[in-house]
Image (cartoon, rainbow, N blue to C red):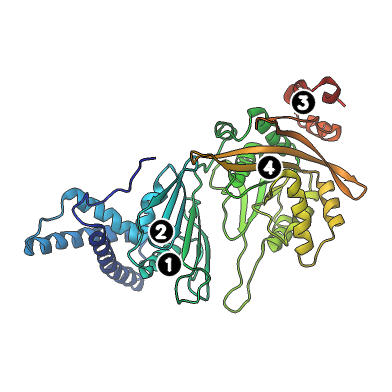
Amino acid sequence: MGWEPTDPTFGELSAEERRQLVRRIADQVGTRVSAMVQEALESGRSMSDDAEKVASSTQIQQALRSENEARLRRGLEPLSDRAHRGLLDAVMAHVYGLGELEELWHHPEIENIDANGPFDVFVTFVGGRRKRWHAVASSQEEYLDLIRRICRRLGLIEVEFDARHPFVDLQLPDGSRLFALFGGKGNSGVGVETYLCIRRHRFPDPTPQDLVNLGLWPAEVGDFVIAAFAGGENVIVAGDWNSGKTTTLRAISLAAISPWERVVTVEAAITELGLLRSGRLENVVESFSRPAGAEGEGEVTVADLVRKATRRLNPGRGIVGEILGDEVGPVLDMFTASTRGSACTIHARSARAALRRFEYYGRGSNPPLEADMVRMGLAEAAPIVVHLTADETVEGEMRRYCTSILEVTGYEDGHLAATELWGLDDGGRLIPKHAMSAERRARLARHGWDWVRDGWAHRLPSEAALP
């Protein structure tokens, strides 16, 4: 974890000199290239993105040569060829990428980038270790400009970011999620500072073995969950913040869903699951919610999309990125309307708490759902609930692991019946706890999964193995 930021000028310029030069050249080049793009458009031949970047690179190199000539006239040493190359990359990152965040964004060992204003920046490495980073802008104005440029250039949708529009939630080209909250002194924002968070997905196409290698669960647990989803069982992936829910659901989906199945995904604001990007699934419909516009109209919620998209777009399976509220009823409808198996994620402290959170969200939805209706819907859906958590060790490492696999088996006397199939022992190991219900065993057997051969019958006492 001794990695340090790279100085593109190798000490030939101070950080502030470098920042001012990059910004000045970027402004110059931006003006020139914008004029070239407009001229091409008016002549009836639009300039492609690649052609625009080539033009920018050419203009940046010319500007850097002019800078060296100016340095010589002032009696200064010219910038070296390697500094020239580093500054070219820095200006291109300023214009087309994440500016001074570019190096972090592309670093393979970084998971999260958190900026509490321009000067207070932290990065989280693989394993959970955190490191304070250097400033990413020289002022609040430059910092806001950086965020707005990222939104304008790299967001999938057009966004505004100011006191009237204090939230930005968008997806970067590599699938990373960027969230920003507008704030700062005297600007009528909603935070003490303007905060920026980028969550990177290090495993765009995770395999079942990746989850085992990461210590999430033993291979036989992953094999069961994947077999259950492949066999048409509904799956709920629950857990703490940053516990790996989306990565786990993506891995399960890519392993369990046949390439020719039609899948409809519904997510809040962006498409983090990225099942289509994997290239393994051919027929994926990716949808995401949209906030209301400036006039208060045009909002499309996750619940709206679940109601319509998972009914009208001929889905084989429906997958909802995250349960947050009003979508509880539509998701239960989706779960109970098909035997092909659907899935979602939800924040919860335990597997059983995930079921109670369905009730909590149901009561708060519009119109509200009675707890009994939610319980009956869950009983009919009979999901497998996977619970994940994340612990930070004293060394600063982050350990993500599965704490429980639960099956919902029915509705009895106003209560959900559920059995913990796998759980933690006193040493924190995930071990078999109980036998699976005969009904689910029979359903999975019809899809080729055998309780004795593929399950954990051999790991349980004889009286509990085959009830």
Residue 120, which numbered label? 2
Q: Is residue 411 above or below residue 55?
A: above
Q: Which mark is residue 148?
A: 1
For label 4, the SS is strand
Residue contact at pointers 3 and 2, CB within 8 angstroms: no
The amino acid beneath tag 1 is Arg
Q: Position of residue 46 (x, y in %)?
A: 37, 66
Residue at the image position 64 percent from the left and 39 percent from the top = 252
Q: Which residue is mark 3?
A: 450
Q: Is residue 202 left or right of residue 33?
A: right
Answer few, some or many: residues within 10 Å of disc 1's Cα (few below 14, many 20 plus, some between 14 and 19). some
Tag count in the figure?
4
Q: Nearer the viewer, mark 1 or mark 3?
A: 1
Q: Does label 3 or label 2 sit earlier along the sequence?
A: 2
The three-letter code of the residue at mark 3 reads: Asp
Q: Earlier in the sequence, mark 4 or mark 3?
A: 4
Circle 3 or circle 2, nearest the eye: 2
Q: Quadrant of residue 234?
A: top right
At 36% from the left and 50% from the top, the residue drawn is 103
Residue highlighted by disc 4: 387
